[in-house]
Image (tube, rainbow, N blue to C red):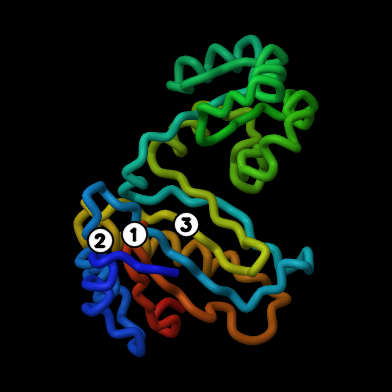
């Protein structure tokens, strides 16, 4: 993969052989975010889990104290009083049956998170093939299938992020923007790691956190010493 001049210059500032302390890593990753836009800072956590086993799956959500720096558009599937509640709570889109063809046939996906009340999941289930691969399917574990739509919307708008194992047993989560202060990024990162450590499967034998890297959208990654995160 051919890298640009900016990336190569930034990479010189990172010691590839070193495992950084969390605070050092946050400082370093901010210094290598040199793109012309406000880059997203992400954490990539390689675990010792085997996601093929149901008891080693990890999935959940956590509200980052300083948010993600991104404006999140929320679609809520609800009806009657719950639909009115969702609108009052600041949902960007609220609806039911009528949204199915719009999403299925017209490819409308102008939203980032989908919330549904439990009684609407029969309808939402018909969108599984569209929403599932994009990670947009509501799920009780992440708090997006709920009767408390106000809390769900407030949490999402405040900076709630989902974490889950991908097929290679890695968790990828945004922890903020390059424009955030080191203190804000550190607080978000610490909150995320506390949630992931709590989610460690009891059936797991061996090392849980194999490697942890923080990286800006366009820059090199900075490796963190996993022993400092347990």
> Circle 1 sits on which residue?
218
**Which residue lies at the image location 69% right of the left edge and 78% below the top edge?**
204
Above or below, 22 against 218 in this view is below
Question: In x, y percent, where is residue 44?
Answer: 47, 66
Vertical arrangement, residue 155 with respect to residue 82, above or below:
below
Residue at figure coordinates x 19%, y 56% from the top left = 181
Of residues 73 and 189, the one nearer the viewer is 73
Q: Is residue 227 left or right of residue 20?
A: right
Nearer the observer: mark 1 or 3; the answer is 1
Asked if disc 3 and disc 2 are in contact, CB closer than 8 Å, the reply is no
**Picture mark count:** 3
Which residue does the numbered mark 3 point to in the structure image? Answer: 173
For disc 3, the neighbor class at 10 Å (few under 14, some 14 to 19, many from 20) is some
Q: Earlier in the sequence, mark 1 or mark 3?
A: 3
- Against 189, residue 72 (above or below) is above
Q: Residue at x 67, y 70 (%)?
A: 201
| Image location (x, y in percent) of residue 41 | 34, 58
Label drawn at residue 62: none
Q: Secondary structure at mark 3?
A: strand
Residue wearing tag 2: 33
Local SS, label 1 = loop
Crowding at dot 1, Cα within 10 Å, few <14 / some 14-19 / many 20+, comes out as some
- Whether tag 1 and tag 2 are in contact, CB under 8 A, the answer is yes
């Amino acid at each position: 993969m051919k890298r640009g001049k900016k990336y190569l210059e930034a990479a010189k500032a990172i010691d590839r052989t070193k495992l950084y302390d969390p605070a050092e890593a946050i400082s370093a990753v901010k210094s290598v975010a040199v793109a012309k836009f406000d880059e997203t800072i992400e954490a990539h956590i390689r675990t010792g889990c085997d996601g093929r086993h149901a008891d080693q799956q990890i999935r959940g959500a956590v509200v980052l104290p300083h948010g993600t720096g991104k404006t999140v558009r929320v679609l809520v599937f609800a009806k009657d009083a719950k639909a009115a509640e969702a609108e009052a709570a600041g949902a960007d889109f609220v609806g039911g049956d009528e949204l199915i063809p719009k999403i299925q046939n017209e490819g409308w996906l102008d939203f980032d998170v989908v919330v549904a009340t439990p009684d609407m999941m029969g309808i939402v289930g018909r969108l599984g093939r569209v929403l599932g691969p994009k990670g947009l399917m509501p799920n009780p574990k992440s708090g997006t299938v709920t009767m408390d739509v106000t809390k769900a919307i407030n949490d999402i708008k405040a900076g709630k992020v989902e974490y889950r194992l991908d097929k290679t047993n890695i968790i990828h989560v945004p922890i903020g923007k390059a424009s955030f202060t080191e203190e804000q990024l550190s607080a978000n990162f610490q909150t995320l790691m506390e949630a992931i450590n709590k989610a460690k499967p009891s059936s797991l034998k061996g090392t849980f956190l194999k490697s942890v890297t923080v990286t800006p959208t366009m820059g090199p990654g900075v490796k963190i010493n996993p022993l400092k995160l347990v």
